[in-house]
């Protein structure tokens, strides 16, 4: 943590995000923003980011119109349960998209990308480590993430695009049934957010923060309180892109950070929500030509 940065502590109401948000919202702005026009001209002095999330194996055959842009951001849950055939199909779809770069994090449904999941958890979803290993070996691969050849895969890691710094993390609060990349609210999740660098311009996470894009159909806030505090008090990115809560698709702002719930699928898993776009000014000393020289990594 940089000198002078505010230390983030576990909120007293971390286990009850709705209660925490009722207390927090009084002291800050909460602005609902209109969706940006996705078909305006992309200018040379800006990078246009196109945001999607929670496509769940549906977007590949949906016919959903993808707007023009430079970089695609996907905030996780590109499969239903991480089956390797799902990942193959998704990777192939990414290869056909015209964006110069595609960046993604995993979500709680992308089970086989979480190398820490137990055999019993995988079996509960009809998956087995032995079958995964056999599949990878037959293709000369050592890990599932190596299947994502058409994207930059971020796992508690950063990438710089034309001087714009992005950080991606797949974690979300543990719910009823154990899924991928999940930790308990409070200290466990806070340890994940503590890794986010303070010079992050664009943050990608799978879970929303408390109070922004996290309202369920039952009118409950389910985002992470420690993530909100990390974003607002320490990191302060210009944009925070996420998904996870399908029914809270849309854009909000606290007056500094723009929060984008980019869930493509609706609550009923219909891939009908349009991609959300935003333009980011290219920092001085950089140019859009740098995109042409970036290499994919994982």
Image: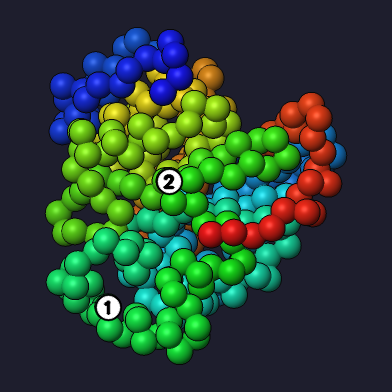
| SS type, badge 1 | helix
* Numbered disc 2: secondary structure: loop
Q: Nearer the viewer, residue 172 or 142?
A: 142
Left or right for 182, reference 71: left
Residue 232 horizontal/vertical position (percent): 42, 21
Of residue 184 and residue 60, the one placed in the foreground of this image is 184
Instruction: Name above or below for residue 117 compared with residue 262.
Output: below
Question: How far across and down, in percent of the image, does residue 1 sit?
Answer: 41, 23
Q: Quadrant of residue 21?
A: top left
Q: CA distance from mark 1 to mark 2?
A: 23 Å
Q: Which mark is residue 212?
A: none
Q: Mark 1 and mark 2 in contact? Answer it, CB < 8 Å.
A: no
Question: On the image, numbered disc 2 is attached to which residue?
Answer: 156
Q: Residue at x 20, y 33 (%)?
A: 186
The percent position of residue 158, horizontal first and vertical second, equals 53, 43
| Residue at x 53%, y 59% (from the top left corner) | 298
Image coordinates of residue 133 in percent, x first then y, are 35, 81
Circle 2 crowding by C-alpha within 10 Å: few under 14, some 14–19, many from 20? some
Identify the residue at image location x=38%, y=26%: 230
- Of callouts 1 and 2, which one flags the residue occurring earlier in the amino acid sequence? 1
Disc 1 marks which residue? 129
155 to the left or right of 125: right
Question: Which residue is located at x 56 percent, y 71 percent?
Answer: 91
Report crowding for label 1: few under 14, some 14 to 19, many 20 or more residues within 10 A (C-alpha): some
Q: Is residue 149 above or below residue 249?
A: below
């Amino acid at each position: 943590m940089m000198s002078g940065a505010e230390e983030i502590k576990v909120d007293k109401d971390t286990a009850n995000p709705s209660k925490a948000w009722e207390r927090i919202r009084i002291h800050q702005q909460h602005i609902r923003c209109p969706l940006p026009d996705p078909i305006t001209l992309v200018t040379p002095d800006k990078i246009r980011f196109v945001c999607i999330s929670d496509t769940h194996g549906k977007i590949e055959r949906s016919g959903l119109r993808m707007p023009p842009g430079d970089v695609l951001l996907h905030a996780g849950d590109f499969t239903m349960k991480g089956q390797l055939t799902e990942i193959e199909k998704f990777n192939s779809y990414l290869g056909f998209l015209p964006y110069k770069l595609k960046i993604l994090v995993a979500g709680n449904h992308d089970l086989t990308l979480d190398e820490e999941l137990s055999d019993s958890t995988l079996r509960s979803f009809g998956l087995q480590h032995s079958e995964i290993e056999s599949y990878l070996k037959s293709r000369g691969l050592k890990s599932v993430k190596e299947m994502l050849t058409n994207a930059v895969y971020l796992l508690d890691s950063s990438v710089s695009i034309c001087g714009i710094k992005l950080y991606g993390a797949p974690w979300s609060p543990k719910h009823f049934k154990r899924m991928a990349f999940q930790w308990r609210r409070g200290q466990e999740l806070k340890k994940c957010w503590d890794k986010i660098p303070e010079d992050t311009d664009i943050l990608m996470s799978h879970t929303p923060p408390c109070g922004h894009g996290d309202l369920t159909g039952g009118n409950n806030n389910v985002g992470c309180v420690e993530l909100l505090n990390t974003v607002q008090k320490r990191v302060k990115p210009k944009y925070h892109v996420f998904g996870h809560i399908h029914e809270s698709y849309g854009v909000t702002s606290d007056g500094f950070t723009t929060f984008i719930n980019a869930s493509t699928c609706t609550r009923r898993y219909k891939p009908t929500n349009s991609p959300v776009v935003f333009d980011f000014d290219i920092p001085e000393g950089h140019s859009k030509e740098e995109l042409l020289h970036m290499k994919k990594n994982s």
